[in-house]
Every structure is written in structure tokens, then in C-alpha cells.
Image (spheres, rainbow, N blue to C red):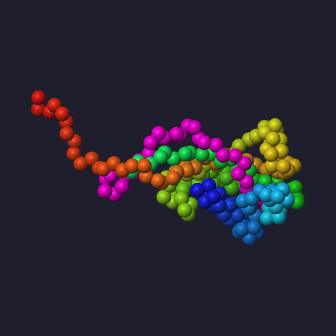
Amino acid sequence: MINIALQHVVSELNTYFGLRTGAAADSNVVAASLFDVDGNVNSAAQNKVVMSMVNLEQDAVYKPLESFRTLPDGSSERLKPEININLYILFIANLSSYFEAMKSLTNVISFFQLNPYFDYKSISGLENIRGRLSFELFSMTFEQQNNLWGVLGAKYMPSVVYKVGMLEVRDDQVEGIAPPVKEIHIEGEGV
């Protein structure tokens, strides 16, 4: 589910960049890291805006206890409750020109100002899930930025972080089925 959501964001951002810059609609933004698994510079991320997930947290506010799904015959399936998560997405302007990097960051920010959320029904592969992804600019302190770039193993580049909430992650394995209620008997009636 995370992959589907992030692929949709990259696709929409590339379309937006294409409209703003006239570049090909798939050539500006990539989902990647700055370095490959061997620690070498990732060539796919060169001269691009790089989108990279830098953190994932469980949303403690929305924590359902049980979950049921009603079937067409009126019976109910009991499922494990979904886990609601928030993602922290880093957009890095990995461009050789500093001013082009600033322009690209402005485009990322203006894109999310224009599109602060995406309904799941508009995302192919998630259309059967209720809810939406919301994007909120996440400001980090200088210390947090220093720590983040240290973990990434890179020197600071122009970038912006967005908190993406809330994705619902669920395994649809059924734990039990309850038959439909067809009648109700009240004890002590007529006394």
C-alpha cells in the first residue's frame, strides 16, 4: 500500500512539473535514495528531485480496537484492526544549479499547497479503501536536519519534509464470521 501511494505522488508531481517547466512528464521526480546499497552515488537520482521516505510512525490517536466488515448476506467478518501510519517524506533537489534547486523546491511546495490531500478513490489500487492521504509541511530544527543528513550519509542539499498521514495498513485475513441477526427475543415480556 505504501508503494502504491508513493508511486501515485511521484506520478502526480511529475505531471505538475511537466506543466510548470515544459519538461517530459516523467523526468523530474524520482522515488529513490541518494546512494545505492553499496554506498555509491545513485545515478538514477542525479539532476532530479528525489523523494525518499525517512521515517514511519504509527498514529496513536486513531487506534481502532476491533474491525468488522458486513457481507452482502448480512453476516459480518471479524478482522484485525488496521494500523494507521504516518510517513515522513523528504524531497531533495539534487540538481547542479542552486537556483534550479530552489525553483524545484518551490514547485514541490506549491504542488502540495494546491493538492494538500488525495482521496484513496482517486488512486488506482486503493480505490476500495475509505479515507485520504494528507500532506503537511514538516519543519525540522537545525539539529534534526543535521541528524537526518548524517544518517543519510550526505551533505545537506536543498530539501523539504512532508508528513503524510494517514495510511491504513491491513491484512484482510478473516478471524471469524458472525451470522446475521434475524430476530430478537426479549425475556420477561408479557409479565
Q: Residue furthest top?
A: 191
Can I make out residue 122 in this image?
no
- On-image quarter of the N terminus: bottom right
Can I make out residue 27 in this image?
yes
Query: 26 above or below 121?
Result: below
Whether residue 179 sits left or right of residue 122 in the image: it is left
> For the image shown, how many numbered marks are present on the structure?
0
Picture quadrant where residue 147 is located: top right
Whether residue 135 sits left or right of residue 28 in the image: it is left
Residue at image x 48%, y 45%?
Answer: 81
Picture quadrant where residue 58 is located: top right
Q: Position of residue 156 (x, y in %)?
A: 85, 48
Q: Position of residue 128 (x, y in %)?
A: 48, 58
Q: Position of residue 17 (x, y in %)?
A: 72, 63
Residue at image x 39%, y 49%?
Answer: 176
Q: Position of residue 121 (x, y in %)?
A: 52, 58
- On-image quarter of the C terminus: top left
Whether residue 18 sits left or right of residue 61 in the image: it is right
Residue at image x 83%, y 64%?
Answer: 43
Residue at image x 63%, y 51%?
Answer: 116
The answer to if 71 sits in the magenta stretch is yes
